Image (tube, helix red, strand yellow):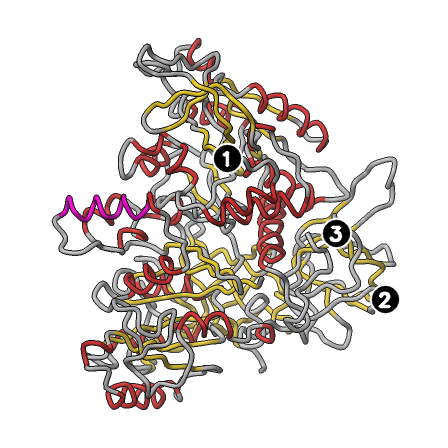
Amino acid sequence: MDRGWGIAGSGQYQLSQLQAIEAQSIHIIREVAAEFERPVLLFSGGKDSVVMLRLAQKAFWPGRIPFPVMHIDTGHNFPEVLEFRDRFVDAMGATLVVASVQESIDAGRAVEEAGTNPSRNRLQTRTLLDAITEHKFDAVFGGARRDEEKARAKERVFSFRDEFGQWDPKNQRPELWSLFNGRHRAGEHIRVFPISDWTELDIWQYVADEKIDLPSIYYSHRRQVFRRDGMLLSTGPHVDPGDDEEVFEATVRYRTVGDMTCTGAVESFAASAEEIVIEVAASRLTERGATRADDRVSEAAMEDRKREGYF
Amino acid sequence: MELLRLATAGSVDDGKSTLIGRLLYDSKAIFEDQLESVERVSRQRGDEYTDLALLTDGLRAEREQGITIDVAYRYFATPARKFIIADTPGHIQYTRNMVTGNSNADLTIVLVDARKGIVEQTRRHAFLASLLRVPHLLLCVNKMDLVGFDSDVFDSIREEFAAFASRLEVSDLSFIPISALQGDNVVQRSANMPWYEGASLLHHLEQIYISSDRNLIDPRLPVQWVVRPQATSQPDYRGYAGRVAGGVFKPGDEVMVLPSGLTTTVASIDTFDGALAEAYPPMSVTIRLTDDIDISRGDLICRPLNQPTVGQDLEAMVAWMTERPLVPGDFLALKHTTRWVRAVVRDIHYRLDVNTLHRDETAPSLGLNDVGRVSLRVTQPLYYDSYRRNRQTGSFILAAEDTNVTVGAGMLLGPD
């Protein structure tokens, strides 16, 4: 980013929009560290959580990030993302907690869904809520953005969760100025979304400006893929193409990284963050619409999952 | 690229959703999959036209009942600016939602139906925008196509509204005649209204001058967090992290810390990206001071010759947001800048009718969606400015001590 702090020609003392939302995000992260006993930052290795972790680093610099990061591990990860996760968290000097969906299944706390290559997207909720209880986390940072999805467009930055981890969209706390209300009773917790006001384009612009490292699958590469439900899925350990699903090699990148079984690739030659900024600016599909089967279940799929305690 | 936060308010039938839909669509912020999804739902419901309100109304209950429940945030950008729209419903919980949406807004758009003119809701929206001190108010006279693009209709609405607005504290007021449905004066100047010589709505939003809206006069840094790396490489580092809430800080500035009243000097202004020559709102920074004095979260760094008001007895305009009424004697949790304190309600001076601006001095309480002037006493002194002077150091929220829910929003009145 141009760290001249301000915009040339716009008059003095004016931040650029990226500087303004960065300052707001840092403010939110500091408020949480100061007002909660045991915060945790959810980290998937995806671009949004990477940017969020970088913002946390900035918030406390030159001090260390005063809370751990947690990965809800579906067991359906892209190998490149897992490798990146360990390297990046280590470089930040942060502590990593891994909560495993496979362990929830093995312990009988969650049941694998039926069908071919079932997604573990929804199962993550059980694992997440169990981990929050086990570690007594009272604030959980998530990298959700309001431009991603219409239910998220209505969610607060500080989003209250009752003792069952549920979100009640019709009964949210009003949120005014920069005065966030994180008050809660024991057993309840607050989900905090510090990058609520960032758009997909902002994230990529920031990644480019700040030269932030991301998993390699975000950038154009050759990969064995097949079409399912109108999406390009990668072949891999958890994804088996059916007899009628033809496998071919394509030049692709990922706009989101999640469960391999339900995250689609897009055909792209964009090999750098700068090239992706150009591509995203011209894109006519939302990132979730283009690449996430989990949101296609119904008009309110995200709202329903969030009510149950999803991210 | 600058950021402009705008708030919109209106009811189902005044064309607000159509206007937002058009701004989003014409600036390419609506994606094909979103539009397809909206078209599909509209068809299923048997709507005669694609209902762009479905773009903003995301919750199940909203779609089922065809209403907007809550503040929704929408994003779009032009080459000049990024815009964040806080879109609030006009009827349900209007005060609560309007106050919320306006609290951070640079500009509020109030929509009027050209056929109906100024109605109660118009006055209410304008009043709440002025109460929250949104710096710019824009009245869009919509559905001009339905009055034959008649300049007399626009002029008479403008005059009536300007007369009403003169009773409010509105620093910048503009008027634009539009047709959201047909796009007149939304993105492009309309050929149907050659008598209108001003900018199109989008051009207005791109050009309006917002740099002078923040307080750059009174240096204020509420301390959020004390940075102490406690690392061998920086054993003595001690920095005070916070968001600049007013004024400009520079290294070398003499500063005062409240509540201690001790004075010292700014040694440096640190960020991850390097030291800064100046810090101003709304930057998040870490300030180091030359002297080692005891400072913790909730303290305030200011200038010895420019101090805020310090006091435990507060006068404020309060917007009440919950069913249980506010009555004298109530105890509440109050958050101001980076501090929570306990507050007791001493007196309710009057309840303001947000439609007529009439002051009811006999009101014994404030009910849901009421606004009134209230006296509070807090357990510890606050360091504050009047809301008129500083939206950050002049505002507070109230939470119920039992449920922890946010129940009120306050704007402090001060000596100026």
Does B331 appear above or below B15?
Answer: above
Does B175 appear above or below B313?
Answer: below
Question: What is the three-letter code of the residue carrying label 1?
Answer: Ser
> In this rendering, does residue B92 appear at all?
yes
Frontmost residue, A242 versus B11 = A242
**Residue shown at the point (44%, 45%) measured from the top left:** A283
Percent x, y of residue B286:
74, 54
Q: Which label sits on residue B57?
A: none
Percent x, y of residue A241:
38, 14
Q: Which label sits on residue B252?
A: 2
Let me know if residue A58 is in the magenta part.
no
Q: Does the residue at mark 1 contact the one at mark 3 (Cβ under 8 Å)?
A: no
Frontmost residue, B45 versus A120 = B45
Q: Name the residue under label 3.
A: B271
Q: Name the residue under label 1.
A: A268
Mark 2 to mark 3 CA distance (whole Å): 17 Å
Percent x, y of residue B71:
36, 56
Mark 1 to mark 3 CA distance (whole Å): 36 Å
**Residue shown at the point (73%, 49%) measured from the top left:** B226
Mark in front: 1 vs 3:
1
Mark in front: 2 vs 3:
3
Q: Is the magenta stretch mostly helix, strand or loop?
A: helix
Give the chain letter at badge 1: A
> In this rendering, does residue B362 appear at all?
no
**Residue shown at the point (46%, 69%) measured from the top left:** B346
Instruction: Please provide the residue range marked out in magenta.
Output: B34-45
Q: Residues within 10 Å of mark 1 (few under 14, many from 20)?
A: some
What secondary structure is marked by label 3? loop
Mark in front: 2 vs 1:
1
N-term-proximal mark, 2 vs 3: 2
Q: In which quarter of the image is residue B59?
A: top left
Q: How crowded is mark 2: few (under 14 residues within 10 Å), some or many (20 or more)?
A: few
